[in-house]
Amino acid sequence: MDKIGKYEIVRELGTGATSTVYLAIDPFNKQQVAVKLFDLGILRDTNRAKVYRKLLMTEASLAGKLSHPHIAKILDAVMEGEVNYVVMEYVEGSTLEQYAEVDKLLPVSTVAEIAYKCCKALEYAQHQGVIHRDIKPANILLQGETDIKISDFGAAALQSDQSTQVSGVGSPAYMSPEQVKEHRLTHQTDIYSLGVVMYKLLTGKLPFDATNNHSMIYHITNIEPPPPSTFRPEIGPELDAIVRRAMEKDTAKRHQTWDEFANDLVGFSSSVVPTQNEILDTEKFDTLRSLGFFKNFSDVELWEVLRISQWRKVPESEYILRDGESGRSFFILAQGTVRVTKQGRLLSLLHRGDCFGEMAHLIERDFKRSSDVIAKNDVILIEINPDVLMHATIGCRLQFGDAFLRMLVKRLSVANTRVSHLLADHNQTGDE
């Protein structure tokens, strides 16, 4: 087979019970894609075939609807008689399955960061009216050390179309109590499943030791699992508590929102940064969300900012910019205070969330810095290269333009107030 529809087959990537995934080329843009070709003919049970086709239609209906850096995009779908396939973004890497084995476990901090990114991706999906319902290591793709993409939304429940909800879908070991009981599901079922994923990635073991599905269902609904630290003491009580809360059988005791889950992970990650100079993506994203400069950016745009920016720590008294030097990058203060000086005279102090160096970007030509910028205390800088920003999405670039405009208006207002005070003082002196 050379083609599936318009897509030119490169090689087979993998095969399952009802589908085969191929690496292919989209002839129109020459980009690599993954094509999942389904063969429902092998399902002799007519009812089972109907269920699977319903799941395929669900996944196909999401084509172009979920656009998030940590969700594998569904680009195209064809459901016509015997020809059934879904075209997805090709993600070079592997699933988390191989890292859920005792001899291949990831560092604890890495698991927390992966879980955080899953939280933000699934929160986005929830806001689009989508509950995944089949969160497990095999459906989370890993690129590099911590970059993930959630895939396989075939089992998803779409809140706008209750007819897509098919009971009995998902992987039993990762199902929530309400899912195995076939109760009405909310995003909290995905929270529970992500808790189980964390448990497996942290320990290499499932929380419940069951020999069959019936035993598994009994354990899920009635038995409390041992804390992850039982099998890996380095995990500690804080992460034990996060996993336990995510896996609470009573939804009232479970994390109520993805934001609650994510915030718990941020608190944990902040306390276990591996090295003094490393800033985890978990901390970066949480910082961006808290800064006034980025207040109008969507979560998707914030992930893009994180991807195009450079973060670094600068110790007290170190020069960041020097008067007269060339440069085009601009900076946002993520933490700390800097002094802006000219020939040794203090012009201003800039604090957390303030931006500097932006004139080099705004005038769009070679630019020499007009002042010194020096760290008043230990600071964390977010550096943006305009040449990299130029290749960001239109939405992200527009948000930067809006942020610059708000910042310049604020500075103009402060300058006008200062001039008014100076004039008032001058007039008062003249009257005297």
Image: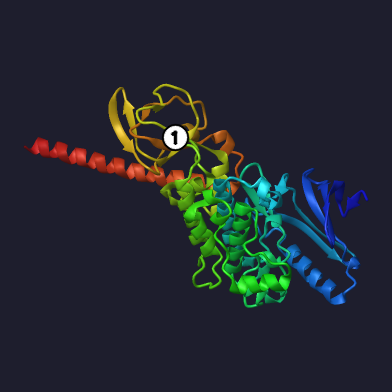
The three-letter amino acid code for the residue at tag 1 is Lys
Q: How many circles with numbers are drawn on the protein? A: 1
Q: Is residue 390 above or below residue 98?
A: above
Location of residue 36 in the rendering, given as x and y in whole percent from the top left corner = 81, 56
Of 119 and 415, the residue lying toward us: 119
Helix, strand or loop for disc 1: strand
Drawn side of residue 268 relative to residue 128, left or right: left
Q: Counting other residues with Cα less than 10 Å from the Cα at mark 1, is it few (<14), some (14-19), or many (20 or more)? A: some
Above or below — where is 263 with respect to 339? below
Q: Quadrant of residue 158?
A: bottom right
Locate residue 241 relative to residue 40 in the image: left or right: left
Is residue 94 shown left or right of residue 178?
Answer: right
Judge by depth and name the residue closer to the eye, 336 or 300. 336
Q: How is the image coloured?
A: rainbow
Instruction: From the top left corner, tell me how far across and down residue 109 is, in percent.
Output: 54, 47
Furthest residue toward right: 1
Looking at the image, residue 159 sits to the left or right of residue 1; the answer is: left
Question: Residue at 34% of width from left, 34% of height from top?
Answer: 377
Residue 28, image x, y percentages: 81, 46
Q: Which residue is mark 1?
A: 313
Above or below: residue 369 compared with residue 18: above
Q: Is residue 301 visible?
A: no
Front residue (pair 363, 19)? 19
Would residue 32 be visible to someone looking at this image? yes
Percent across and percent down for residue 282 are 52, 48
Q: Going 49% across and 52% down the picture, which residue do you hit?
A: 236
Identify the residue shown where x is 65% and y is 53%. 204
Q: Quadrant of the C terminus?
A: top left
Decide: is 220 above or below 143.
below
